[in-house]
Image (cartoon, rainbow, N blue to C red):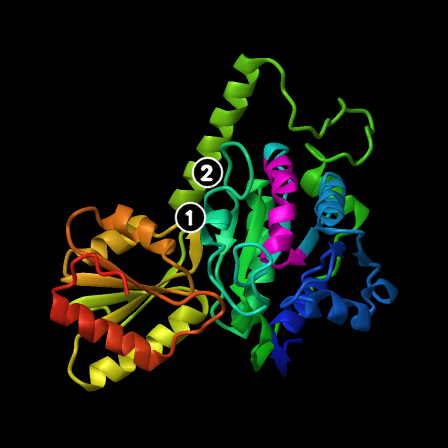
Amino acid sequence: MSELRLMKGNEVIAEAAIRCGCDAYFGYPITPQSEVMETLMELRPWETSGMVVLQAESEVASINMVYGAASTGKRAMTSSSSPGISLMAEGLSYLAGSELPCLVVNVSRGGPGLGTIQPSQADYFMATKGGGHGDFHLIVLAPSSVQEMHDFVFLAFDLAFKYRNPAMILADGVIGQMMEKVELLEPRPRRTREEVLRDTGSWATTGKRNRPRNIITSVELDPAKHEKFNQKLQAKYAEVREKEVRYEELLCGDAEYLIAAYGISARIGQKAVELLRAEGVKVGLFRPITLYPFPTTQIAARAKQLKGILCVELSAGQMVEDVRLAVGNSLPVAHFGRNGGVIHSPNEVVEAVRRIFELGITNYEY
């Protein structure tokens, strides 16, 4: 049965992993996401469900352990934070190139380099534009609450296996560290061997059993064959873009201006919308939930009624580029960001909107 608890975002990732029937977690500690593995160690799921929980030698080791486990058709995952995800980039490309489903959780911190342990959203490009070499995409979900941290573990695994593709939960340090009430879903049992064979036997290395070998690899030295494989991947990504876009709108029906934001910035933007609405300013909030696939068509349709859009991010401006691509030259798109681990306040967003109104919102960078 489901139950209510007060939990931290990182902790609920661990709880959700167990409840969704995850088979294996491989990770390495890094702030601000270390509680994911620490909570799994405390819960000791290997004693109840048989789930493997292992601290690897490094982030490189952990992503390659995920590769091995995913190749057997198992639900495998890892978690890290920005510099750790950078170390996993090659492994993510190999997973995508081998069409292996898995879950990667990135609780982002400020950079570049080691940067700071404070929150950031500056990993948007890394998550949505590949995160490694080659023409590939991750399916990227951006939670804005502890509840969504929980729910997206289930959703990410479902999407990863539906499309045989790595999925990422791109959170920020605020969502990972904050505590909220969360409804924990009823546990799913881990799949039996028979269920794994039924669901993944056509591609996973589950034992030959009177069928041709399943070879898990991302290597193809024949350029003609490799081009066809890449075309197959692009067709899959097109299907994902068509069927899996998720977003949320708040007070957009009569909006003249829009705040576009995800993650913790969307929470802050929501309060800013409330404050501006109280002053009679017609502002709405558009929150992308899937960063890949990005809700390009949906925000372009909404833009037809607007005078301008303000993108609010904990970065120097990354998602704003996708918003500008979506709306083209139909209206100005401005950006308000903080970085280095500094978190904007609702009042700062309100002030940014006021300044942009005064300036006539001409691609303003604040």
As drawn, which residue projects farthest toward the right? 47
Q: Looking at the image, is 262 positioned above or below residue 84? A: below
The residue at which mark 2 appears reads as: 237
Q: Looking at the image, is 24 positioned above or below residue 6? A: above
Q: Looking at the image, is 43 positioned above or below residue 298? A: below
Which residue is nearer to you in this view: 279 or 237? 279
Q: Quadrant of the N terminus?
A: bottom right
Does the magenta segment cover residue 83?
yes
The residue at which mark 1 appears reads as: 293
Q: Quadrant of the C terminus?
A: bottom left
Which residue is nearer to you in this view: 202 or 240? 240
Query: Range of the magenta residues?
Result: 79-96
Query: Which amino acid, mark 1?
Result: Pro
Residue 200 on image: x %, y %: 69, 39
Residue 207 on image: x %, y %: 82, 33
Query: Which amino acid, mark 2?
Result: Tyr
Residue 39 on image: x %, y %: 74, 71
Tell me which corner region of the image, top left, top right, bottom left or bottom right, holds residue 155.
Answer: bottom right
Does the magenta segment cover residue 145?
no
For the question of whether residue 343 can be seen, the reply is yes
Which residue is nearer to you in this view: 212 or 12? 12
Q: Is residue 62 left or right of residue 123?
A: right
